[in-house]
């Protein structure tokens, strides 16, 4: 062998690579076969070992054997993956380069017979591989091409009772309908490519040594008149000049926090304007205190009311401008109750919900939603979903129910109906439910419609029964009046769910507009628990159309793809809603969900919606109690993360939750992992869907390869026929043609843009604004940037 290395080093290297790879594939392939997987790797391993042996003997027949391996691999790969380039890549990215090396003259001249004819089968096999790859690069079998309809001439007028100037963005979703649509059209599909940075503001709020891992900048600013209002991860509130981005004032609530917080984020603030003051014609009248006010929720459980003009506290609201949201809570541990999203504000009431620490214990704060007087801060009503009487008010003898299901994202509001629509989560601990009573299950993972003035239930619709997967309603529902194909106008609610389903309901009564039939789901819960026999499956959905198989497993190379296949077969997976298990369950759609808090962007005039679904499986493995896994809290505190080992104190199991990744840290499911999509709301059909985003900022080399990456945040759409998104794993803002989803423009962001952009106009100029501060657990670059774009001034 030493003489071979000296005389033919490339041949020696090829022998070593073929031999070692053959041993690896043979050993791993036998393991995979024994647990029910593909036999390909055994065959490939044997052929590689034969090739290595023949090369060692300097026999040119090694090239023929390798040609058979390459041709067989191409046939097997196409049979498994079709002509999807990124699915094919790990099946050939090792073998094809080895084949090219074997065909080089520096190798073949050492083989017998050393003739061109001996190389021909291998060259032919390499040529066949090139043809397969070239054909795969010409198309994308995951792509859905189509055109959304133009503006509907008979579309009903947008139904939000409180219309605002076109240039304003007065609520988290612009209006409290949660549509994330602007009627501005100065920026359009023809000129969006000319966008330039108009101004940049640095908040100065950066990650500190006492922050948890889940520090995020997810804010969508609001704009009223000539001022932008936004909050930072530490809930510092800024008022900026909307034209220049210069600071007008700021308010620091001096947030109390520590590394055990599961979240450190602020998605936005809310606005209230005293209608009587706004309509007063008497310029000499005494100003009403805080006639225009900003509501700021903070992660330490407080709600501030501030004068929108000055940032001063509204003294008559609560205790000098602040309401303590811990009042009435059964558990007041700092960080266990965190309002992270802006409240709903009506003419009379500010309606607040909040996140709780997931999967820590059975004794945590309540998920109660409360309505406070918008002027005084007095508690008007409560809806405590875990209480037999959900409207029972707290008193000296009663606190809210521990671990009531909560709502952590912004609700929607229809002022004409005076209904608030609350997207509900599940009672924590989320991943085991054997101890849950009927009261805790009643409104979990549901849309709950309450009278906004009284807190009384009007209707509810449950999207997951006995939720064991944290498959809550993660996004603000979108309200839109739809004129259907029969000409009937239906006041509709669209609720995107983590499952990938979009539940479409009549918002007056909760009746389904798009059918969601109950279908049987996998059974066999962990001991002491149970599984609902059926679940609702909306006919408007992005959920997978078929079960995953080991053919859907992926990797950067065939080496880690093989490991992913073995990992897949070792997990329990019977499709959507496979219950958590001690074996470990593959959860797909994953705990992160196909939809997250970004929601939909709905154009109510064109009767369409833009969505950015994601597709990352998770693993959920229950951990029985034992010496290192006590049933009740000792001195441990929450980990400051929603992934990894979660204790679930008070139930028989802890749980280990994590994304399903290869040994190299890549998703084990083949790409794409993120899309942009357009939906026709009149037909409730998905018209177009394209891979979205590149691996530029997550790969070892900064290559802008478009594979389709996850996103955290949501889209914005405009009357100019352009949608915007910033929330992908790569650091870009992109503009899309709403009609067909084509990318019209993109620009690099200074940090991760895990937020939802907004748009406004001032002095006749339209701006697009994004918060770019990154996301701790998502792994994007942190920062403190607010960036505004506009078209260049015309000379």
Image (cartoon, helix red, strand yellow):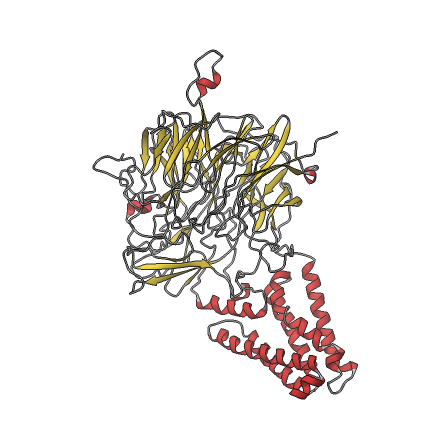
Residue pictured at 48% horizontal, 19% vertical? 278
Give coordinates of residue 393: x percent, y percent: 27, 34
Q: Is residue 427 above or below residue 301?
A: below
> For residue 758, which quarter of the picture?
top right
Q: Nearer the viewer, residue 336 or 36?
A: 336
Q: How many marks?
A: 0
- Residue 508 in view in this figure: no
Q: Is residue 662 above or below residue 354?
A: below
Give coordinates of residue 484: x percent, y percent: 54, 36
Q: Nearer the viewer, residue 625 or 42?
A: 625
- Residue 731 in view in this figure: yes
Give coordinates of residue 199: x percent, y percent: 62, 36
Quarter the N terminus occupies: bottom right
Residue furthest to the left: 397
Quarter the C terminus occupies: top right
Residue furthest to the right: 116
Give coordinates of residue 650: x percent, y percent: 28, 55
Q: Is residue 445 above or below residue 99?
A: above
On the picture, is 379 further left or further right than 246?
left
Residue pictured at 50% horizontal, 49% vertical? 775
On the picture, is 421 further left or further right than 625?
right
């Amino acid at each position: 062998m030493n003489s071979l290395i000296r005389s033919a080093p490339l041949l020696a290297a090829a022998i070593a690579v073929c031999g070692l790879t053959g041993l690896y594939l043979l050993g791993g392939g036998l393991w995979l076969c024994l647990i029910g997987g593909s036999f390909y790797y055994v065959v490939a391993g044997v052929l590689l070992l034969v090739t290595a042996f023949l090369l060692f003997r300097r026999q040119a027949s090694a090239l023929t054997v390798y040609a058979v391996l390459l041709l067989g691999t191409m046939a097997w790969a196409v049979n498994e993956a079709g002509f999807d380039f990124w699915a094919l890549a790990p099946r050939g990215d090792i073998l094809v380069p080895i084949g090219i090396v074997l065909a080089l003259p520096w190798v073949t001249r050492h083989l017998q017979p050393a003739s061109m004819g001996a190389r021909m089968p291998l060259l032919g096999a390499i040529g066949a591989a090139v043809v397969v790859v070239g054909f795969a690069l010409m198309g994308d079998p995951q792509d859905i091409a189509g055109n959304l309809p133009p503006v509907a001439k008979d579309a009903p007028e947008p139904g939000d009772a409180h219309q605002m100037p076109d240039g304003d963005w007065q609520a988290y979703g612009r209006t409290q309908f949660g549509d994330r649509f602007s009627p501005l059209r100065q920026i359009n599909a023809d000129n969006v490519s000319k966008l330039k940075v108009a101004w940049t503001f640095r908040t100065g709020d950066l990650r500190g040594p006492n922050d948890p891992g889940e520090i995020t900048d997810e804010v969508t600013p609001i704009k009223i008149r000539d001022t932008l209002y936004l909050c930072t991860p530490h809930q510092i509130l800024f008022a900026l000049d909307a034209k220049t981005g210069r600071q007008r004032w700021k308010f620091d609530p001096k947030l109390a926090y520590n590394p055990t917080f599961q979240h450190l984020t602020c998605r936005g603030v809310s606005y209230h304007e005293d209608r009587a003051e706004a309509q007063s014609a008497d310029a000499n009248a005494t100003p009403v205190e805080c006639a225009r006010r900003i509501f700021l929720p903070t992660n330490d459980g407080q709600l501030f009311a501030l004068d929108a003009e000055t940032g001063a506290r509204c003294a008559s609201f609560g205790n000098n401008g602040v309401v303590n949201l811990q009042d009435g809570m059964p558990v007041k541990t700092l960080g266990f109750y965190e309002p992270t999203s802006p409240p709903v504000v009506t003419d009379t009431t500010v309606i607040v919900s909040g996140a709780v620490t997931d999967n820590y214990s059975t004794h945590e704060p309540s998920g109660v939603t409360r309505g406070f007087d918008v002027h005084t801060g007095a508690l008007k009503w409560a809806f405590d979903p875990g209480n037999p009487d959900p409207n029972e008010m707290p008193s000296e003898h009663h606190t809210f129910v521990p671990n009531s299901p909560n709502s952590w994202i912004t609700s929607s509001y229809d002022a004409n109906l005076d209904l608030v629509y609350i997207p509900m989560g599940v009672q924590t601990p989320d991943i085991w439910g054997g101890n849950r009573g009927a009261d805790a299950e009643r409104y979990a993972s549901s849309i709950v419609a309450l009278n906004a003035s009284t807190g009384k239930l009007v209707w509810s619709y449950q999207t997951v029964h006995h939720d064991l997967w944290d498959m809550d309603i993660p996004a603000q529902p979108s309200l839109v009046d739809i004129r259907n194909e029969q000409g009937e106008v239906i006041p509709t609610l669209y609720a995107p769910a983590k499952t990938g389903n979009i539940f479409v309901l009549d918002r007056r009564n909760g009746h389904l507009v798009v059918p969601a039939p109950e279908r049987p789901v996998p059974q066999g819960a962990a001991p002491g628990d149970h599984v609902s026999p059926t679940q609702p499956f909306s006919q408007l959905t992005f959920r997978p159309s078929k079960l995953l198989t080991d053919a859907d497993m992926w990797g950067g190379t065939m080496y880690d793809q093989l490991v992913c296949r073995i990992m897949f077969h070792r997990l329990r997976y019977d499709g959507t809603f496979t219950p958590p298990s001690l074996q470990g369950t593959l959860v797909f759609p994953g705990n992160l969900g196909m939809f997250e808090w970004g929601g939909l962007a709905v154009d109510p005039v064109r009767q369409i919606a833009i969505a950015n679904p994601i597709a990352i499986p998770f693993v959920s493995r229950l951990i029985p109690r034992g010496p290192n896994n006590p049933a009740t809290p000792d001195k441990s505190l929450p980990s400051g993360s929603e992934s990894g080992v979660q204790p679930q104190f008070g139930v028989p199991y802890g749980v280990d939750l994590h994304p399903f990744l290869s040994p190299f840290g890549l998703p084990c499911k083949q790409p794409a992992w993120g899309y942009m999509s357009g939906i026709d709301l009149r037909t409730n059909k998905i018209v177009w869907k394209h891979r979205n985003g590149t691996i530029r900022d997550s790969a070892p080399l900064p290559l802008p390869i478009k594979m389709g990456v996850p996103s955290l945040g949501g889209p914005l759409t405009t009357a100019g026929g352009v949608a915007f998104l910033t929330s992908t794993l790569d650091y870009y803002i992109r503009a899309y043609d709403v009609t067909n989803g084509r990318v019209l423009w993109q620009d690099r962001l200074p940090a991760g843009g895990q937020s939802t952009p907004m748009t406004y106009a001032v002095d006749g100029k339209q701006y697009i604004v994004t918060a770019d501060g990154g996301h701790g657990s998502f792994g994007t670059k942190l920062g403190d940037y607010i960036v505004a774009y506009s078209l260049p001034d015309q000379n």
